[in-house]
Amino acid sequence: MAKSAASVEFRRVTKRYGAVTAVQDVSFTIEPGTLVTLLGPSGCGKTTTLRMIAGLEMATEGQILIGGRDVTQLSAADRDVSMVFQSYALFPHMTVLENVSYGPSVSGASKAEAQKMAREKMALVGLKGYDDRLPSELSGGQQQRVAVARALVLEPQVLLFDEPLSNLDAKLRRRVREDIRDLQRQLNLTVAYVTHDQQEALAVSDRVIVMANAVVAQSGPPRQLYEEPASLFVADFIGDANIVPVTISDLNGETARVEIGTIEKRLRHRGAGAGAAKVAIRPESLRLSEARPNGPALEATLSKAAYLGTHMEYTVKTAIGELFVVDRAVERPLPVGAPLYVTLAEHGVTVIPG
């Protein structure tokens, strides 16, 4: 890219629509050349945040900086930012080449120069030779690539994606998200990416900002959010988690004794005090066996089983509640109704602070 990647910084940004607060006192920094995902359920404020980076919405309070420059009061046209919309927003009557060269044309480039810039970006996203096709003649994945090429053609400092894969089928989603990630790395782009899909966020991001009820619930690398959720909401929202009640005692340094039903484990207490607390147990960290293990285990009854090709999904009833289990052993499924024993893996069991 001709331009260097830029940082994006929010300083105590709030957005209100009348009496409704869509984003409240949000601060974060997106480092240059990184892909950061805004993740959260519908209505959490993530798309409003993205639109404020683009200048499509103006902040009610606070400051927005792009590349260290205060852009809070600047319109979308005055910010060096491009956005790929959920609907792709292609011009249906224009060919692929005309769609992609539209931006440079209206910015004053000659037709030949605009087409040269467009073809460069079309080649980057695998659309070489598609010049004369209409959007209606393309697959969903190809339309997505046209939208990306059109956003890239003006070489923006920051590229924004709003739910870019929601219109694609599952197999295509994986391929296109890998394409976006490859492109981001290859061109050293600063990307802000909005999704409500946890797997998508974990797969593509350098960092994830989880939003809930207009505020940032937690921010960090994907692994940290999955393995060390800061709250009940984050534990439950990022991947599947079994949230179970426990008793904490014998705090010593960073660890404590945690009673999970009949199982005792020494875990990092993460600031939780002695007494009642909750832990998040990942479904892949539960082990099921028909024979009684040597160590401590929970007695269980298998109530539901589902075969998903690469793994089995089980629901078991125990004294600490129903537990959801993911088991990679698909060659010998366990029978529903069977009495079982549940043990815990060394990883994937986390005390939830607060």
Image (spheres, rainbow, N blue to C red):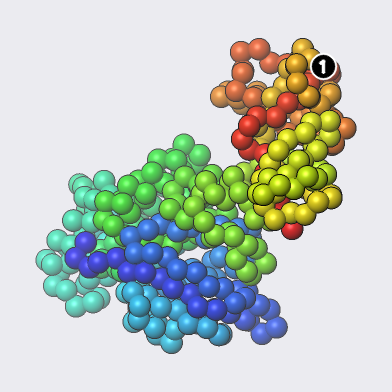
Any part of residue 94 in sight: no
Indicate left or right for 333 with 292 as reference: left
Say whether residue 308 is left or right of residue 145: right
State the residue in front, 140 or 27: 27
Indicate the quadrant where residue 353 lies.
bottom right
The structure residue drawn at horizontal position 44% and vertical position 40%, both measured from the top left corner, is: 174
Q: Residue at x 78, y 24 (%)?
A: 296
Residue at which label 1 appears: 338
Q: Position of residue 303 (x, y in %)?
A: 82, 25
Q: Quadrant of the C terminus?
A: bottom right
Q: Secondary structure at mark 1?
A: loop
Residue 128 versus residue 94: which sits nearer the camera? 128
Q: Picture coordinates of residue 258 (x, y %)?
A: 77, 40
Query: Which image quadrant: the N terminus?
Result: bottom left
- Note whether 95 is above or below 325 in the view shown: below
- Camera sees residue 211: yes
**Residue 88 x, y percent position in the rendering:** 42, 59
Residue 305 occupies which quadrant of the picture? top right
**Amino acid at circle 1:** Ala
Q: Whole-percent x and y of residue 337?
A: 84, 19
Local crowd at mark 1 within 10 Å, few (<14), some, or many (≥20)? few
What residue is at 52 percent from the left and 56 percent from the top? 220
Farthest-out residue, left: 112
